[in-house]
Image (tube, rainbow, N blue to C red):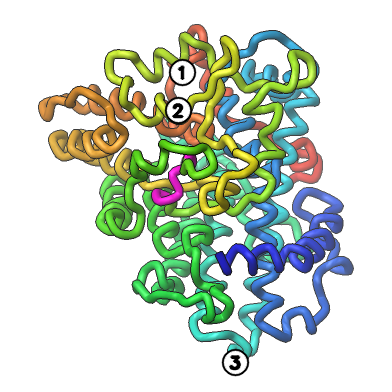
Amino acid sequence: METIKKYKSFIWLSALAFTVCISSCNKWLDVDPDSRVKDDKFFAEEAGFKNLLNGAYITMGDTEAYGRELSYGLVDVLAHTYTWLQNSDARRPYIDAMDGLYANAPTQQLIHNAWSKSYNVIANLNILMERLENADRSIFQPKNYEIIKGEAYGLRAFLHFDLLRLFSTSYLAGGENLPAIPYKKMYGTSLTPVSTAKEVVNEILSDLKVAEELLKVDPIFTGEVIATTTDEGYLSERKLRFNYYAVKALQARVYQWIGDSANALSAAKTVIDVSSTKFPWVLNSALTGEEIVKDRVFTTEFVFGLYQPKMLENQTGYLTELSAVTGIGLVMSAATRDQIYPVSESAADVRAVYLLRFEGSNTYLGRLEQHADRVERFSKRMPIIRIPEMYYIAAEAEAISNPAKAVEYLATVRSMRGVSGSLSPALTSEQINAEIQKEMRKEYASEGHLFYYYKRLNKTAVPGHVGPYNTARYKLPLPPAEIEFGI
């Protein structure tokens, strides 16, 4: 795994750059120019650009971001994935979040940390892109300039999109022309005004268009085989970078979010059409046998994931129980478990058989479980975009105009997961969408997708929530500093 070795070797310098940038924030988006990375020697060689980009990936894996809160933590709590056994101070931020008490200090801190962390990564990506514009291209290995730049544009779009999904009103709820978030495209001290959701979406799609063109030299797209001896394998392990197909997958997400089914379907199909060779379904044989060789995160299905060396440390006490007092204990009730994985069709469903973990009477989500001795190719991998999502997007897009095709997309996923029973090709669009929701709950608990799914559709009935769901909860409040400084 030469790429992972290189990834690790860049941590010290990338961390230095990020420490400088993160510590420089005197408002959430206001960065002190005197503290910026300004040593031209840092960018005199290709390694400086690689280091700063790798720092973005590393920081995205922090617990305030996709290492916890934007995956199995806060965002899954908001989706009512978990059940609390008892109140405790440790659980208070999540209990308040689940109850919609976002202004309470513990929960407010989680929200503000996710916002701040995301915008700090964006700030560093903007530094990188500014420097790339004026860089001497002769210092780059073939294709590296385009790929580094394409990844930076793609990541900037990706981060802004998740901020939009958290802090704005959904399109279906009338949020298209309402104030949403700032789209930060420059590094510096100037304050960036809040844009409408439509303006943010346009910026995201513009960045993705640039990324798509730049990443047409991406080995995962061209099929070029990268030897470990070529630039120390820098362009290998493309699933752990924001690659060409991650761009197409994000386009599918964005178009689905704004209700553009035709473009969502087109982008999703681009990924689906190559999935058999580039993103193949995980095999049952990869889930059986000794624990150290189980592929619980389904790495073959990654369209985009993060290398996260602290996955075991980060989830201890969250997806495992330390004690009734000190542990967070993100527990799924037996009733919820049996609702998601009904016994009638889940006896062979690999998600029920291999991705749930039991401690006494408690059920924990086991997809992200880390075994101390598990082989590295199946551990320390945080899934961000996986291939089943493209099938769900395609099924929803076809539900009205071509329901039989929509059922076919769903049937493919169900078949690969071992679900017994078939779906009728005569299902109505409403029935198809109900099946998609069932599938989403089976597939994506612990990956942070369900809250966005419920919000996009402005659902007033959320599984796990008693009574009608107050849709005002779907919009997280901007951190107080944003309001104070008028940004």
The answer to whether one can see residue 433 in this image is no
The residue located at (46%, 9%) in the rendering is 335
Q: Nearer the viewer, residue 186 or 437?
A: 437
Of labels 2 and 3, the one closer to you: 3
Disc 1 marks a residue whose amino acid type is: Val
Tell which residue pokes out farthest to the bottom in this image: 138
Q: Is residue 463 magenta?
A: no
Residue placed under numbered mark 3 in the picture: 138
Q: Earlier in the sequence, mark 2 or mark 3?
A: 3
Badge 1 or badge 3: first in the primary sequence: 3
Q: Amino acid at mark 2?
A: Tyr
* Quarter location, residue 315: top right
Q: To which residue does mark 1 refer?
A: 462
Residue at the farthest front position:
290
- Which residue position is annotated with label 2? 454
Q: Residue 290's spot in the image, x, y percent?
A: 49, 38
Residue 264 vs residue 450, the one in the foreground = 450
Disc 1 and disc 2: Cα gap in Å?
7 Å
Residue 300 lies in magenta, yes or no?
yes
| Mark nearer the N terminus (1 vs 2) | 2
Kindly report the distance in space between the C-alpha atoms of the residues bearing marks 2 and 3: 48 Å
Residue range of the region highlighted in magenta in the rendering: 296-301
Q: Say above or below: 203 vs 379.
A: below
